[in-house]
Amino acid sequence: MKRFLLFLPLLVAVIVGVFLFAGIGKDPTKLDSALIGKQVPVFSLKSLKSPDSSLDEGLFRGEVTLLNVWGTWCPACRDEHDDLMRIAREKKVAIIGLNYKDNRDDALVWLDRLGDPYRTVIYDPKGTLGFDLGVYGAPETFVIDASGVVRYRHVGVLNGEVWEQILLPVINEARENG
């Protein structure tokens, strides 16, 4: 019994080491999503700017769209905002915002001060749509094809490199495959 107790710390260290080693080299921005290849979840939420207007999954039909999950509480969302403004100006794709677990007034001030890259913004104060999308936090960006099918999920800041090397090719492929 004493021998077992001597080896117990070594056994625990080996088990922990195996788990840590398994995670090394994995890209945290490539979190798998169960929604890839599936329709955007059914939802009915209010518009951020027009609280009397309801928005639903029909927003994602007719053209390839980016769905950008953001919040004013998210420093990384501020980091990507200028890139979203540039993409919106270039009009290479429609961007719909999902204001996630945020305060409406804070979000409106944010867009007024920093600019509004979004065609419309879905207001999700309780995170219900975010939960259905499998959102871990913000920012996250989804590419949704013209049929409303989720084609890609990017976790983290959308910057120029991510746009050019990852998202734009996915968008172009979604456009080609109709």
Image (spheres, grey):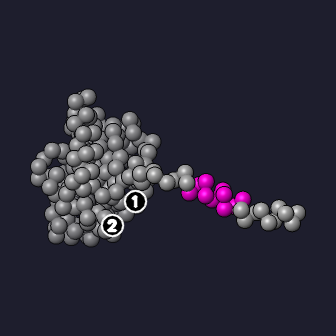
Q: Residues within 10 Å of mark 1 (few under 14, many from 20)?
A: some
Q: Residue 19: within the magenta?
A: yes
Residue at 66%, 62% in the rendered image: 13
Q: Are marks 2 and 1 in contact (CB under 8 Å)?
A: yes
**Mark number for residue 111?**
none
Q: Of residues 23 and 104, which is closer to you in this image?
A: 23
In the image, which disc is placed on residue 74? 2
Say whether disc 2 or disc 1 marks the residue closer to the N-terminus: 2
For label 2, the crowd category at 10 Å Cα-Cα, with few meaning under 14, some 14 to 19 and many 20 or more, is some
The circle drawn on residue 137 is 1
Asked if one can make out residue 76 in the rendered structure from this viewpoint, the answer is: yes
Count of number-bearing discs: 2
Whether residue 132 is visible here, answered yes or no, is no
Tell me the magenta residue range.
Answer: 11-20
The three-letter code of the residue at mark 1 reads: Gly
Query: Which image quadrant: the N terminus?
Result: bottom right
- What's the residue type where badge 2 is placed? Cys
Looking at the picture, how far across and down is residue 76, in whole percent? 31, 64
Q: For the view shown, which residue lies furthest in the top direction? A: 177
Q: How far, Cα to Cα, is label 2 from label 1?
A: 9 Å
